[in-house]
Amino acid sequence: MSQIWIISDGKPGHFNQSLGLYQALARLKPDLVMHSLPPLKIRDGLQRTWPEAYQQALASGIPKLVIAAGHATHLTLIYLKWRLGCKTLVLMKPSLPWALFDLCLIPEHDQPPMSDRILPTLGALNPMRPGPKQPDSTLLLVGGPSRHSAWNEAEFFAQLQTLQRHTPGRLRVTSSRRTPDATSEKLAHWPNIEFYPAQQTPPGWLAKELAQTQTCWVTQDSVSMVYEALTAGCALGVLEVPQKQRNRLSQGLQKLADAGIITLFSHWTGAALPQPEQAFDEAGRCAQHILTRGWL
């Protein structure tokens, strides 16, 4: 029985990346045991003491691998490697030198350097899984303004109207925490859609919906949702939003479009989006890579 620790900074997006990798590893090696722990405080390291949660985890043995995402987890990974001798893995482009970690899973759009300690990925890992698809089912994931993207409500609703004209059945729409209140209010009264506000969806709702949805559209700002929908096996289209500047995230989406993996709205003919020709499973690919290294 091998142990994996996830060091979580409390941010759901970061934890989901780690969880997606752990679950992929567990599918290949079912005897894995996982503990989720918060980052150590500086005084814990200086005093060489273990908080209670760490004591409970250590009662089961020393972990063979510790994984994490988020800058706040870096020092804990380095300390655990020094004190316990375990392998460490970070799911991002680290803010500290990457040579301090045994492996870095870095999205290609972050332009990682070549190294045997770096494995480039297509987007961030996630725990989504495909399931049996409901024919003619379509889900639209609506984001909002972000650091890289602006928001033009008129353009969004114009694209929505076009999407409705070419969508069989009733279109389901859900928002996000970034969706402007005015857009959500308008969606709540928009004809011929089923609107599910993000604040009213229970935990696990999106994963369940994506698993059974045949076609998914995502607004361009919601890059993480693009990769989640791909992992769930959806045919994927992207509604375009104004970009504040040319950035690595939009370049990454363009690369997916050039490869025929996603369809940009401006290139859409109105026909049914092409179904995936092969599984999009970056977590599974990374898990297999880790096992070939003999760490578990």
Image (cartoon, grey):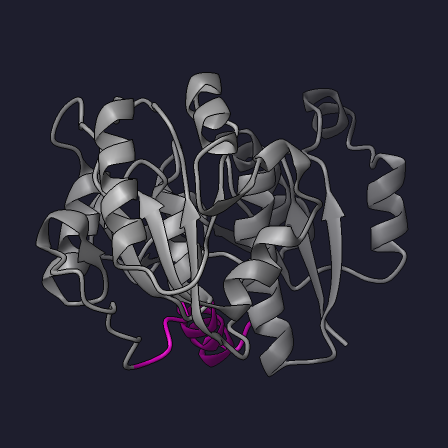
Residue 295, magenta (yes or no): yes
Q: Is residue 47 visible?
A: yes
Q: Between 249 and 272, which is closer to the camera in this rendering?
A: 272
Q: Is residue 148 visible?
A: no
Task: Give above or below for 150 relative to 208.
Answer: above
- Image quadrant occupied by the C terminus: bottom right
Residue 157 at x, y percent in the picture: 29, 33
Task: Give above or below for 187 relative to 180.
Answer: below
Q: Residue at x 49, y 31 (%)?
A: 189
- For residue 3, what is the image quadrant? bottom right
Residue 272 at x, y percent in the picture: 24, 69
Q: Residue at x 56, y 60 (%)?
A: 209
Residue 279 at x, y percent in the picture: 37, 77
Q: Residue at x 57, y 52 (%)?
A: 206
Q: Residue at x 84, y 34 (%)?
A: 51
Residue 111, magenta (yes or no): no
Horizontal side of residue 153 vs 283, given as left or right: left
- Chain part drawn in magenta: 278-296
Task: Give above or below for 278 relative to 236.
Answer: below
- Image quadrant occupied by the N terminus: bottom right
Residue 273 at x, y percent in the picture: 25, 67
Q: Between 188 and 206, which is closer to the camera in this rendering?
A: 188
Q: Between 22 and 139, which is closer to the camera in this rendering?
A: 139
Horizontal side of residue 48 vs 39, given as left or right: right
Task: Give above or below for 54 relative to 10.
Answer: below
